């Protein structure tokens, strides 16, 4: 995959964080995950689709784990899928075969069922545990050392016991205020880069299609598409151009 310049990743990170659609709260979080994606040979915008920030820690969604496992040649055969138990056999040419099962008894024994999500969605939580355990067991390269959101949310927060002695209260450091992007970054237009090799007729076709979809007004061009659409277009250019018949 062609490397995406840091200025474009920064713009994507800002748009992802401002959208509030993916559980990523700050541009810094989105930028860090985007760089992680690029290091894995994936488009930085995939960070919004595949990752969660849980308790301040990055995690890879269990469905993304399974998708990457299958893309790498892995297979899974589900044997049981109920609110009481989930089991499946996971197979990979390099890692062999592994049957993993999780039951509500296992979750209770591990002290996980105190989490309200386990009461509301037991089957989905059991499935996520099966996926993360199996993939970590036979093909850990998929995970990049990360845990699933379901696992991270079950990690207990360490609580300091009260004592009779006065304790030092840690100073809470405020998150740095978001500074405006440097001029050389803020002046970059993603659509100019994306359509740099397209003809004028093709650019006009994008503009006309965007107006028809209500993304921009009659007196605007493709350069003035909302940043969220520009980000998606850069993430999936083939799909974007295909929607306009290009």
Image (cartoon, rainbow, N blue to C red):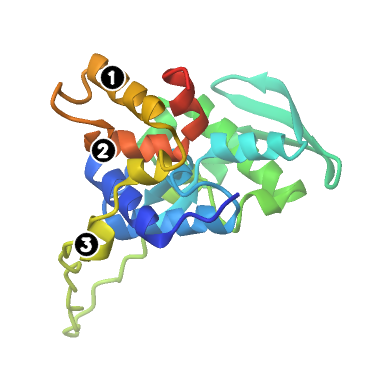
Q: Tag 3 or tag 2, which sits nearer the N-term?
A: 3
Residue closest to the eye, 16 or 78: 16
Badge number at residue 109: none
SS under mark 1: helix
Residue 4 is situated, as x and y percent measured from the top left of the image, at 47, 54
Q: Which of marks 2 and 3 is in front?
A: 2
| Residue in view at x 60 percent, y 41 percent | 65
Q: Which residue lies furthest to the front in this view?
A: 200
SS under mark 3: loop
Q: Distance between the residues labelled 1 and 2?
A: 12 Å
Residue 215 is situated, as x and y percent measured from the top left of the image, at 22, 24
Q: Distance between the residues labelled 2 and 3?
A: 19 Å
Which residue has dot 2 on it? 223
**Which quadrant of the structure image shows residue 118?**
top left
Q: How far apart are marks 3 and 1 (CA)?
A: 30 Å
| Residue in view at x 43 percent, y 44 percent | 45
- Eyeballing the image, is 188 above or below 150? below
Task: Confirm whether residue 55 shows in the render.
Answer: no
| Residue in view at x 29 percent, y 71 percent | 161
Residue 154 is situated, as x and y percent measured from the top left of the image, at 44, 48
Rate crowding at label 3 as few (under 14), some (14 to 19) or many (20 or more) other CA atoms within 10 Å.
Answer: few
Which residue has dot 1 on it? 208
Judge left or right: residue 56 versus residue 89.
left
Which residue has dot 3 on it? 181
Residue 128 is situated, as x and y percent measured from the top left of the image, at 56, 36
SS under mark 2: helix
- Eyeballing the image, is 159 above or below 136? below
Rate crowding at label 2 as few (under 14), some (14 to 19) or many (20 or more) other CA atoms within 10 Å.
Answer: some
């Amino acid at each position: 995959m062609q490397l995406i310049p840091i200025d474009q990743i920064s713009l994507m990170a800002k748009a992802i964080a401002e959208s509030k659609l993916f559980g990523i709260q700050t541009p810094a979080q989105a930028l860090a995950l985007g760089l992680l994606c690029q290091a894995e040979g994936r488009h930085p915008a995939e960070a919004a689709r595949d990752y969660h920030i849980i308790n301040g820690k990055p995690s890879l969604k269990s469905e993304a784990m399974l998708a990457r496992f299958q893309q790498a040649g892995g297979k899974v055969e589900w044997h049981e899928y109920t609110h009481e138990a989930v089991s499946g056999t996971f197979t990979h040419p390099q890692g062999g075969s592994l049957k993993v099962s999780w039951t509500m008894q296992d979750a209770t024994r591990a002290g996980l069922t105190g989490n309200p999500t386990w009461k509301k969605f037991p089957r989905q939580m059991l499935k996520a545990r099966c996926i993360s355990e199996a993939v970590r067991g036979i093909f850990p390269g998929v995970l990049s050392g990360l845990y699933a959101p379901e696992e991270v949310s079950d990690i207990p927060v360490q609580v300091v016991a009260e004592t009779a002695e006065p304790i030092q209260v840690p100073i809470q450091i405020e998150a740095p205020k978001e500074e405006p992007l440097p001029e050389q970054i803020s002046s970059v237009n993603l659509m100019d880069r994306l359509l740099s090799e397209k003809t004028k007729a093709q650019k006009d076709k994008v503009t006309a299609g965007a107006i028809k979809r209500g993304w921009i007004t009659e007196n605007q061009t493709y350069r003035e598409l909302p940043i969220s659409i520009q980000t998606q277009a850069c993430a999936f250019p083939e799909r974007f151009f295909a929607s306009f018949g290009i």
